[in-house]
Image (cartoon, rainbow, N blue to C red):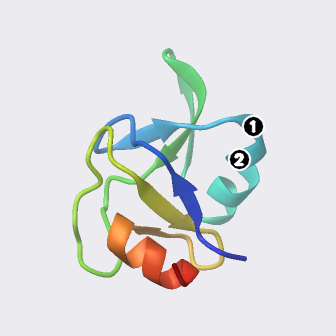
Amino acid sequence: MQPIRFEAADSSDRTQIGEGLTRPAVAAGRLETGRSEGKYFLRHDDGCAVCGAEVVADKPFYLDPETGEILCETHGAERRGE
């Protein structure tokens, strides 16, 4: 399965996701629930698994559902073969 691209992070710590993305988030060990501002969140506070770049609010990032890794725009696109 190819990495999933998120158009824009909500913050540097987490991004709200819909129910359809909960399965890959759980498999990656990155699902957060029970927050007052929403039901499901993808945690990405550790940054890009390749270069360590921080996920920045309003910027794209990727989740590799096979490895559970968060990837920056550059490394996510590379892994997708773009």
Residue at 45%, 82% in the rendered image: 78
Foreground residue, 26 or 57? 57
Task: Give the quarter of the image for residue 72.
Answer: bottom left
User: How many marks do you count on the picture?
Assistant: 2
Mark 2: give few (<14), some (14-19) or many (20+) Cα within 10 Å. some
Residue 62 on image: x %, y %: 48, 62
Residue at 65%, 78% in the rendered image: 66
Q: Amino acid at mark 1?
A: Glu
Residue at 39%, 42% in the rendered image: 9
Query: 34 above or below 7?
Result: above
Q: Amino acid at mark 2?
A: Thr
Label 2, label 1: how many angstroms apart (C-alpha)? 5 Å
Query: 11 above or below 66?
Result: above
Task: Identify residue for label 2.
Answer: 22
Foreground residue, 80 or 21? 80
Task: Identify residue for label 1.
Answer: 19
Task: Give the quarter of the image for residue 55.
Answer: bottom left
Can residue 49 be seen here?
yes
Mark 1: give few (<14), some (14-19) or many (20+) Cα within 10 Å. few
Residue 20 on image: x %, y %: 77, 43
